[in-house]
Image: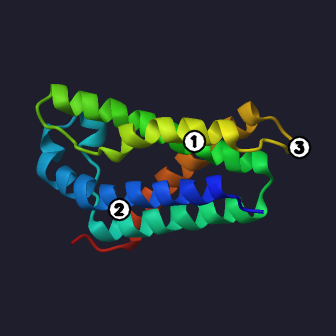
């Protein structure tokens, strides 16, 4: 059964994705040349982003509906790590004088930590292992989706 913490989590996820759509995608267009080499080659259009975010939302909802509670908590941990990375990006880009203003990340971080602490973690595996698996799965999924969209969608 999906409880209110999961509903709050989905709402936070949607808020963050909408903010990324309106802030991150145009910011990348404007600042790609000023970024460090590994991320300088990211080509992200609004269409690419929408496909990736929608697929992530479908996976998140599928986990919430069909998986044991420990996997729901694990996907929350993976998302929280994503927020920590964005907080690092906020600091890095501020110091480089090209600020990326994704304010949902630092605002949501304490809320997500609280949601993780109140979400049940019963299941056939422990939360640390489930979180490790979920972080790896989400990272691989993100890389795969960037690759798939770059090969299948026309650049705008």
Circle 2 residue: 18
Do tag 2 and tag 1 residues touch (Cβ < 8 Å)? no
Say if 1 sits above or below 112 in the image: below
Please state the horizontal and vertical placement of residue 38, each as a whole percent of the image: 31, 37
Crowdedness near tag 1: few (<14), some (14–19) or many (≥20) residues, C-alpha within 10 Å: many
Q: Is residue 75 visible?
A: yes
Mark closest to the chain's N terminus, 3 or 2: 2
Circle 1 residue: 78
**Mark in the foreground, 2 or 1:** 2
Task: Locate the C terminus and report the quarter of the image it occupies.
Answer: bottom left
Element assignment for label 3: loop
Please state the horizontal and vertical placement of residue 14, each as a whole percent of the image: 44, 61
User: Residue placed at 55% from the left, 56% from the top?
Assistant: 8
Say if 84 sits above or below 122 in the image: above
Q: Is residue 64 left or right of residue 11?
A: right
Q: Is residue 77 visible?
A: no
The answer for how far apart the CA atoms under marks 3 and 2 are is 34 Å
**Mark in the foreground, 3 or 2:** 2
The answer for how far apart the CA atoms under marks 2 and 1 are is 19 Å
Crowdedness near tag 3: few (<14), some (14–19) or many (≥20) residues, C-alpha within 10 Å: few
Using the image as rendered, state which of residue 141 and residue 62 is in the foreground: 62
Please state the horizontal and vertical placement of residue 143, each as a whole percent of the image: 48, 51
Do tag 3 and tag 2 residues touch (Cβ < 8 Å)? no
User: Residue placed at 42% from the left, 69% from the top?
Assistant: 51
User: Residue placed at 29% from the left, 74% from the top?
Assistant: 154
Mark closest to the chain's N terminus, 2 or 1: 2
Element assignment for label 2: helix
- Residue 124 is tagged as 3
Q: Residue furthest top?
A: 95
């Amino acid at each position: 059964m999906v409880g209110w913490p999961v509903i709050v989590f989905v709402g936070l996820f949607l808020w963050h994705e909408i903010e990324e759509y309106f802030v991150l995608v145009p910011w990348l267009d404007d600042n790609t040349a000023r970024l460090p080499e590994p991320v300088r080659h990211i080509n992200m259009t609004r269409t690419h982003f929408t496909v990736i975010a929608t697929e992530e939302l479908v996976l998140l909802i599928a986990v919430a509906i069909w998986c044991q509670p420990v996997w729901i908590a694990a996907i929350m941990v993976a998302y929280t790590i994503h927020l920590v990375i964005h907080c690092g990006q906020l600091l890095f880009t501020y110091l480089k004088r090209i600020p990326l203003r994704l304010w949902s990340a630092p605002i949501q971080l304490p809320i997500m930590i609280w949601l993780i602490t109140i979400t049940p973690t019963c299941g056939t595996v422990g939360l640390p292992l489930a979180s490790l698996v979920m972080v790896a799965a989400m990272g691989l999924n993100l890389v795969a989706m960037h690759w798939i969209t770059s090969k299948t969608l026309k650049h705008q």
